[in-house]
Image (cartoon, rainbow, N blue to C red):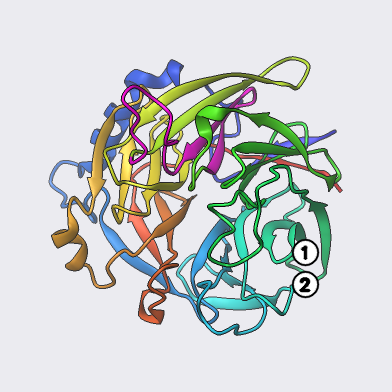
Amino acid sequence: MRWQVSRRGNTRRAMTVAAVAALGVATVVATAQAAPGQAAERDWLDIEVFAEIPAPGHPEGITVADDGTVFVGTQQHVSEPHTGPSKIFAFDQSGELRREYVIEGQDPRHGAGIVGMAQDGDGVVYALDRYPQRVIALDPATGEQSDYATFTQVKSLCVQASALTLVTQCAIPDGLNFGPDGSLYVTDVAQALIWRIPPGGGEAEVWFSDPRIESVFGANGIEFVDENTIMFAQSLTGPLDGVPPRPDTSRLYTIGIEPDGSAGELELFWESRPADGIDGFAIAESGNVYAALAFANAVVVVSPDGREIARNPANPVENLALDVPMDDPASVAFSGDRVLVTNHTLFIGNPASWVVYDVHAGEPGRAQFRPQVR
């Protein structure tokens, strides 16, 4: 199995978060300052609108190609009239729309359903679909689409109704990322587990599950810290986790991959403030973690040693002062020295909020594994 890392980041082997703990904060401070005698072009974490997203809107998944092309997937609010299939939109680095792809084979009884997205070493885009539950492989050059992987129902408590799928633990794959060997790891936001899809695709298998991540809004964004360590987001902690239980906070966890490919120990990396609602995130070369807070409507930066060092907007008043206020920000992806953040606006559904933000990070993203799997 051959693999490569994205040329957007450092192509050397990824360092562990612990090894760069002292570097992370220093990197941010240095990159946020201007050279002597020069004014800074943008403040650290300055927020601009990168692109407006056409219907069906509700952008969630995002991935940035090696040539800078930005792919954004669309979802839909469960209570909205069904407006047809999802689309994936392709933008250039300046935010200009260049192409759109209509997703084939979606269930017409539901609305749009594209969530997490990733890429392989050949530039093929992999998108999680909820209707039906599958991973789609999209060749952006030809527009050809195929089913790469499928999922099964693990938990016995599931009612396939729009308002009940989360609380009754129906299978809801949400975030995905490739490992160096071509395995695709996928979080399930409702079933308290992480799936593994073997290189080349097929039926997903349960790779990790633990009662500590049982939650109405559970495992979400997922990234590789290094070739043997996964980090994932827990949107809300479980109602029985902790003493006393705190089901209103969010967490970032890490799990090691054992030599035989099995999951290692679950380790807590960071716990949020109450009602933050973490969704997706991306990791910088420095080890800083840039995460979208869906409930708090902000982007937070967590240092390599697991401390919050900044967030923007800092409060709801600052959020309302933005040209387009954040409303359920979802996925995060590096593009040069900025992070692009999708504004999901899943629960309100305001088309004026269907945007992708450009948040100034002042540092590049960590290389992602992009294996050749097909």
For the point 64% across and 22% down, the residue is: 228
Question: Is residue 203 within the magenta segment?
Answer: no
Image spot of residue 191 (x, y percent): 62, 43
Tag 2 and tag 1, C-beta contact below 8 Å? yes
Image spot of residue 366 (x, y percent): 51, 37
Q: In front here: 145 or 13? A: 145
Image spot of residue 305 (x, y percent): 36, 21
Check the picture and name the quadrant holding the N terminus: top right
Question: Badge 1: how crowded within 10 Å, few (<14), some, or many (20+)?
Answer: some
Q: Is residue 249 above or below residue 298?
A: above
Question: Is residue 237 within the magenta segment?
Answer: yes
Which residue range is magenta in the image? 219-248
For the point 59% across and 38% down, the residue is: 192
Q: Dot 1: what SS?
A: loop
Question: Badge 2: how crowded within 10 Å, few (<14), some, or many (20+)?
Answer: few
Exactly how many numbered labels are in the figure?
A: 2
Image spot of residue 117 (x, y percent): 62, 55
Q: Which residue is under mark 2?
A: 143
Amino acid bearing label 1:
Asp
Q: Which residue is under mark 1?
A: 139
Q: In front here: 172 or 317? A: 172
Q: Is residue 11 above or below residue 115?
A: above
Amino acid bearing label 2:
Gly
Q: Is residue 310 left or right of residue 218?
A: left
